[in-house]
Amino acid sequence: MTISEKQLSNFQAAVKKGLATFWRPMPMTAVEWADEHFFLSAESSYLEGRWETLHFQVAILNCMGNDEIRVVNLMKSARVGYSQMLKAAIAYMLEHKKRNQLLFQPTDAAATGFMKAHIESMIRDVPVVKALAPWYGKKHRDNTLDTKKFSNRRQLWCLGGTAAKNYREKSVDTVVYDELAAFPADVEKEGAPTFLGDRRLEGSVFGKSIRGSTPKNKHECQIERACKESGIMMRYEIPCPHCGEYQYLQWGGPDADFGMKFDKSDPSSVAYLCPHCAALGTYAEWMPQQYKGIWRDRLSDLATKDGMEWTTIDGKPVDAPEFVSFHIWSAYSPFTDWRRLVQDWLKAKDDVGKLKTFVNTILGETWEEQGEKLDSDELYRRRENYLSDVPAGGVVLTCAVDVQDDRLECEVKAWGKGDESWGIDFKIIYGDLAKPQIWEELDQFLSQNYQHESGNKLHIACTCIDSGGHFTQEVYKFVKSRESRRIFAIKGVGGVGRPIVSRPSTSNKAKIKLFAVGTDTCKELVMARLQILDRGFGYYHYPIDNRFDEEFFKQLTAEERRTRYHKGHAILEWVKVRKRNEAFDLEVYNLAAREILNPNYDALALHLQEAEEVEDKPKTKPRRRFKMKGF
């Protein structure tokens, strides 16, 4: 039987097609695949053409593709090729590993822009990916601005991270968060973006979460938080060209004993001072050392050169970690001469807004506002012994009540001339705020008398109760029948320049007197007074008493006033640096109570003195009950 060439060709094609389902490509790492297949596009890169992985990029890119590692975090500066690594990893997962992927950008607009400028150009310029996109350049249902469906039955979504609906109804193998620090911390009150997005991986055998970002403000930055949660922070160490000691490059600053050193009048004089041998090395001397570089976390005793094989610091093989974080900054980039870093610093050093940009985008570090802060230990050490419940200088008592979901926190404070004040009592009342028992216990607490050093008894003259939480109506109900005892509901109102207390409003369902408290104004005044060191006007006293313990003073210093810059304008704001700040709030509410009361300290002191003199005289007739005057 004779077979023509055409028949043989058709037969071979049929056999090849039939066996295609059994064919598997030789396994490749992400770096091997990218170096062979990935191309840089003109629209999204300074350079155009074939990709070549840099030394410090090898481990990062391989970790993005390593199935043993489930979470990869990258805190980075600009100019380190992160966007290109991300696209290479996406293309690798799509073509080589055949994975469904979900890419989040901070906003819907950013997602659309990334799809147009980065993903579509990547599909066009990477041949093995374009072969999976027969619809490329055409109007097709598989080719939309938020979804790309490929011929290998895999999909890539690119969505904004601000809408909770974007985190639903998708089952994927890889979730990517690009510029995580710019995402909302709480997505429409449903939770953190990484928590919502990573739930899309629950059914995947090789689920992978990739988070990368230029950092922002310390204590608030989500990429910083993600790196801390991983427990591992890898830094790229390279050997000194003079002594050979491995180290990661640091900016150091003009006053440090290491890092970049230069003549301010000549940025080209920059050289790196090794902390081990104190030798100065130039950019040209240090950069060739990168091929010897190793990623290390000395605290975790972990090291890797390529992201595939992992060892201890001394070289003992270990398993790859499940969670890993990397930090890299501009000093390692072969496309950024150190002279440019110095020029950027010289431009930024005298401008806080520019300096923040330098720290975030050049050093790849979080920015910590130099805010006003208090030392909790110093305040704790300032405590003193009282001779009585209320020292002689305190002539009137106020009380503040902070309402939490499971408790009431109360502080009684004495006030005297010049607004000198004394902490008198502190109590936490636990219970169900929806039931009357806890409110009855609060009433008993507010009905107490305190022994004054003069021998007189003082009662609480004014109480402010926070009504801004989840139990507003319960607070209203409690104060309604007790306003004659000057027990009032308050609500904090933010904003610069607001009065400590505004005139009360009765436009509420309970028709009670509701006082608006200018919280920013109060906080500034409380912080200023806590910084007073000399006893007298404005000084805050606290007793040596277990009720005023170290935790109380940690809460008292739980907020800092910082300057934030928005579009070049300085904005003062209060930032919590500790989770619990109830003690600080209590001082604010007590200040509001003192303002509502508006006491005449001289008159009150005089009445206390007169009452003391009456007590000292022989009693011939029953003494009339002493009534305080002065407010």
Image: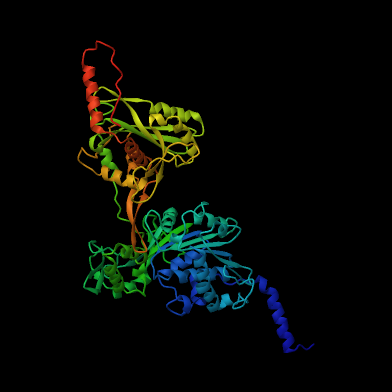
- On screen, residue 221 versus residue 12, left or right, reads left
Extreme residue toward the top, this view: 620
Residue appearing at x 46%, y 75% in the figure: 44
What is the x, y in percent for residue 309?
Answer: 46, 63
Q: Is residue 265 in view?
A: yes
Q: Choose between 41 and 464: the one closer to the eye.
A: 464
Residue 388 vertical placement versus 616 (above, below): below
What is the x, y in percent for residue 120?
Answer: 54, 74
Q: Choose between 197 and 514: the one closer to the eye.
A: 514
What is the x, y in percent for residue 297?
Answer: 38, 58
Colour scheme used in the picture? Answer: rainbow
Extreme residue toward the right, this view: 1
In the rendered image, which quarter contains the N terminus? bottom right
Residue appearing at x 28%, y 39% in the figure: 380
Residue appearing at x 60%, y 67% in the figure: 155
In the rendered image, which quarter contains the C terminus? top left
Q: Choose between 563 and 29: the one closer to the eye.
A: 563
